[in-house]
Amino acid sequence: MKKLICRAVGTENGITTVVASTDDVDRYEDVVAQHWSLDAFRANPVIVFGHDYSSAPVGKATQVEVIDGKLVAQIEWDDDDDNPAGKRTARQFAQGFMSAVSVGFAPGQSVRRNQLDEDNMYAGPSGMVYGTPESPNVLLEISAVPIPANPQALALRNAPEAPSAPIDVRSELLYLLKTDETLKSEIAALAADWSEAEPSPLAWVAGKS
């Protein structure tokens, strides 16, 4: 499992929006390409502290998406009195004492950066590139951490252009309906029994309506 540390955007109404991963070269000279399998994480969206899997989570992710080439998540902290670590972490993020997060993931297909063509954006003298569209990285967890490794691992608190979780829900939904193969298969099954006069759902998804 690999870990990559990135940045938090800030806390509002108890929710912290974080840029959990980017494709910037990290301090280990590695690149995590933003090709992600998110199903496992969405089924168990735990936020832990420092990749400590023996302790209770400090929060949960309420949203996670790849937006503009970055893995963006919204975190709801467990700040109940019976979870001192969660309560402390929530306060430290809210007050700016902590800003960084780190992703724990199972790498997808990997290649050495020095084996890439010189004109490849990820080419470099050392390090690896993890993940491809055909073999994406599998997100397992997101951790709150004190020290960032990614060069973009700085809090953007109060920044007017701070990245956010999906704003246009309709656009995100339309994108998923047109690109998610599982959803397209389900719609195809519905279209097989379609008897209305209007174009079938499958025609709409294919962009033919």
Image: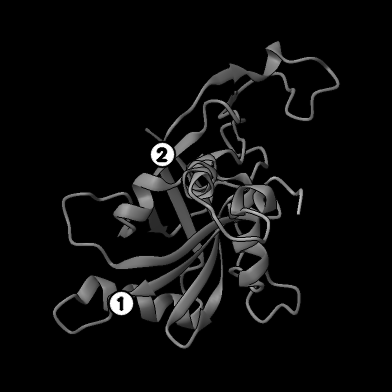
Residue at left offset 73%, top offset 15%: 116
Could you tell me which secondary element the residue under label 1 belongs to? helix
Which residue sits at x=28%, y=67%?
A: 58
Secondary structure of the residue carrying tag 2 is strand
Q: Position of residue 156 (x, y in %)?
A: 65, 71
- Counting from the top left corner in percent of width and height, residue 102 is at 45, 51
Residue 108 appears anywhere in the view: yes
The label on residue 105 is: 2
Is residue 29 left or right of 53 when viewed as pictured? right
Q: Quadrant of the C terminus?
A: bottom right
Give the residue displayed 27% in from the left and 73% down from the top. Answer: 86
In which quadrant will I find the N terminus? top left
Q: Quadrant of residue 181?
A: top right
Which corner quadrant of the image does residue 154 belong to? bottom right
Of labels 2 and 1, the one closer to you: 2
Which circle marks residue 88 in the picture? 1
